[in-house]
Amino acid sequence: MMAWRVGRASSTFLSKFVNGRITSQTPRSFSSADANIQSFREKMMNQMLHLDVNSQIGSCMPLAAMRIGTMIHNIEVNPGQGGKLVRAAGTCAKILKEPTSRYVMVRLPSGAEKLIDTRCRATIGQVSNPSHGSRKLRKAGQSRWLGRRPVVRGVAMNPVDHPHGGGEGRSKSSGSYGRCSVTPWGKPCKSGYKTGPLKRRR
């Protein structure tokens, strides 16, 4: 019985092959697949150019695919590194120049303007919870919950604890008239004293 079935199947296959009913499948062409992906990518870019910015809020894409004046946040500094800039609550940055070259000009929340690689990705829109900075703490303990320790003024300390300490009443000079403000370690911190790193000479 089994031999009869095998013989019948082989004869059916041979008759189909002779009559030309069997068509060989064409091998997969990777070059055509890459071309299709490229054309699909170009179509998506064209669609994003004509879309309304409000419909793209929350979308993450390279800076090269964005338009001038777009509000963005969670910006990468190096391509593929992950978001580093503009991540605080309620903040956003703005694209100042059209991203046509290698770098794009972005204005940060601090007002500084920074050149960022157009391959870096960012998220369109503003970070939520803009009223975070205006929130009032109900009690001192709530500040401690956030990990913030109390700040004590130097003039309220003793001379052994701070250079501003001691003296009769509220005296900032602490015995020496006209002394400028200093840190707890005696380093001047006001009156135009330069505390940052020295600028490079041009």
Image (cartoon, grey):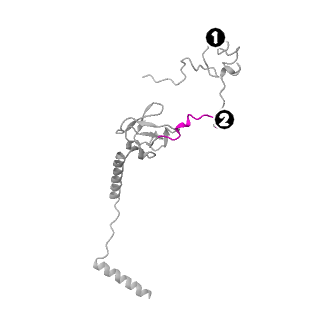
Q: Which residue is mark 1?
A: 177
Q: Position of residue 168 (x, y in %)?
A: 71, 14
The answer to which of 77 and 172 lies nearer the viewer is 172
Would you call the spot at circle 2 few (<14 residues within 10 Å), some (14-19), or many (20 or more)?
Answer: few
Q: On the image, which quarter does residue 158 sit in?
A: top right
The amino acid at mark 2 is Arg
Identify the secondary structure beneath mark 2. Answer: helix
Quadrant where the C terminus lies?
A: top left
The amino acid at mark 1 is Tyr
- Horizontal side of residue 201 vs 157, given as left or right: left
Q: Work out how far the residue at label 1 is from the one at label 2, CA to CA, in angstroms.
A: 37 Å
Q: On the image, which quarter does residue 187 sit in?
A: top right
Identify the secondary structure beneath mark 1. Answer: loop
In the image, farthest residue toward the top: 177
Residue contact between numbered discs 1 and 2, judged by CB atoms under 8 Å: no
Q: Which residues are magenta?
A: 126-145
- Horizontal side of residue 59 vs 163, given as left or right: left
Residue 144, disc = 2
In the image, farthest residue toward the bottom: 1
